[in-house]
Image (cartoon, rainbow, N blue to C red):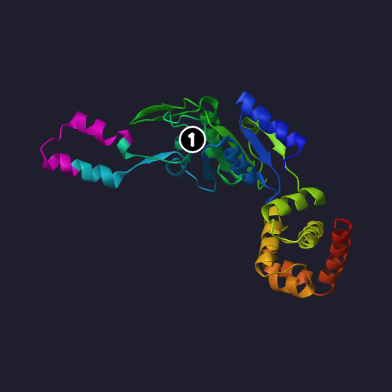
């Protein structure tokens, strides 16, 4: 359910072979966008989940030391241990563990993959520097092995929830797109597509309440994925419409903090449900 601006950004990323940098609040669909791109292009989605302390061993490659040691013992036992030959054997592709970044530029690929570098704002600035170099040439040098260069560069999607500012040098290499929370009509269409078994009224009620919750002061604002999950949970309970009891029973699907759950109970829930009923009636 992409709008015109997002569709143009995707088209340009494909045509110009430039990384696409997506920012927006958590749960607006940044990760889902990369999955949809891989599905449409019928190619692999390779995901690198960033976190504080992410290093080369987890992001790019590492050597399979236990297998190397075993191979070394076999060579020694068969008296085939010759230093230079053993080095070539032990540091060959057979013992190379390819992590997401190396998988994405694997020269054996016959078609480019979609590389999702998720939540880059959670990684350290040092990793950003390495990533900047990798995205410039789509190649990685492994000291013991050599340089691995992509024959078909991947389509790169970077996402950020803005927990910190990402360095301008990295952003300049990318096309930029901000993804906002969708309008009521757009979110309702997304929900209906993902949960087709839901009644029209139930989908409209839940979407309306989540839209209103995003304007409240909550510890964690629900995203589109929570809207979909809430509707799916209600369908699993054979609910056709949303009522106060259903809200009490399932509110933990959409709100993830005790303070937020407490704030929605009682009169506040009834007020939101009344607004949702009016909205659902107008979209019936």
Task: Tell whether position 172 is magenta.
Answer: no
Residue 257 to residue 22: above or below? below
Please give left or right for residue 117 compared with residue 257 in the image: left
231 sits left or right of 272 in the view = left
Where is residue 80 shown, x and y percent of the image? 13, 35
Tell me which residue sits at (54%, 26%) in the image: 136
Q: Which residues are magenta?
A: 73-93
Magenta-colored segment: predominant secondary structure: helix
Above or below: residue 255 compared with residue 119: below
Residue 197 appears in the rendering: yes
Q: Which quadrant, please, contains the C terminus?
A: bottom right
Q: Which of the 4 quarters of the picture holds residue 132?
A: top right
Q: x%, y% of residue 89?
A: 24, 33
The x and y percentages for residue 156 are 58, 34
Q: Is residue 277 above or below residue 37?
A: below
Front position in the image: 202 or 62 = 202
The residue drawn where x is 67% and y is 70% is: 237
At horizontal 45% and vertical 44% (from top left) the residue drawn is 58
**For mark 1, what is the residue?**
104
Residue drawn at 48 percent across, 35 percent down? 104
Instruction: Report crowding for label 1: few under 14, some 14 to 19, many 20 or more residues within 10 A (C-alpha).
Output: many
Where does the image place residue 228, in percent across and percent down from the top left? 69, 57
Does the rendering let one see residue 183? no
**Of the pair 114 and 121, the residue shown nearer to us:** 114
Vertical placement of 246 versus 68: above or below?
Answer: below
Q: Secondary structure at mark 1?
A: helix
Residue 91 relative to residue 251: left or right: left
Find residue 206 and report its image quarter.
bottom right
Can you tell which quarter of the image residue 203 is in? bottom right
């Amino acid at each position: 359910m992409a709008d015109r601006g997002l569709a143009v950004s995707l088209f340009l990323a494909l045509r110009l072979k430039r990384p696409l940098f997506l920012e927006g609040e958590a749960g607006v669909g940044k990760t889902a966008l990369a999955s949809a791109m891989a599905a449409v292009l019928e190619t692999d989605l390779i995901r690198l989940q960033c976190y504080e302390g992410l290093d080369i061993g987890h992001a790019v490659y590492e050597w399979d030391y236990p297998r190397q040691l075993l191979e070394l013992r076999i060579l020694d036992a068969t008296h085939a241990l010759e230093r230079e030959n053993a080095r070539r054997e032990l540091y060959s592709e057979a013992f190379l563990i390819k992590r997401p970044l190396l998988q994405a530029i694997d020269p054996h690929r016959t078609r480019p993959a979609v590389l999702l570098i998720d939540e880059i704002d959670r990684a350290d600035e040092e990793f950003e520097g390495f990533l900047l170099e990798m995205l410039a040439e789509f190649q990685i040098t492994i000291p013991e092995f050599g340089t691995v260069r992509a024959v078909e560069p991947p389509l790169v999607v970077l996402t950020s929830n803005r927990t910190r500012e990402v360095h301008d040098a990295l952003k300049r290499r990318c096309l930029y797109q901000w993804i906002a929370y969708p309008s009521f009509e757009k979110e309702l269409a997304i929900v209906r597509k993902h949960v087709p078994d839901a009644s029209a009224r139930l989908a409209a009620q839940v979407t309306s309440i989540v839209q209103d919750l995003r304007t409240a002061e909550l510890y964690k604002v629900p995203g589109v994925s929570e809207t979909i999950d809430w509707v799916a949970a209600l369908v699993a309970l054979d609910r056709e419409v949303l009522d106060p009891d259903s809200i009490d029973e399932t509110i933990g699907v959409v709100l993830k903090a005790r303070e937020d759950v407490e704030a929605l109970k009682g009169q506040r829930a009834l007020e939101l449900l009344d607004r949702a009923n009016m909205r659902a009636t107008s979209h019936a």
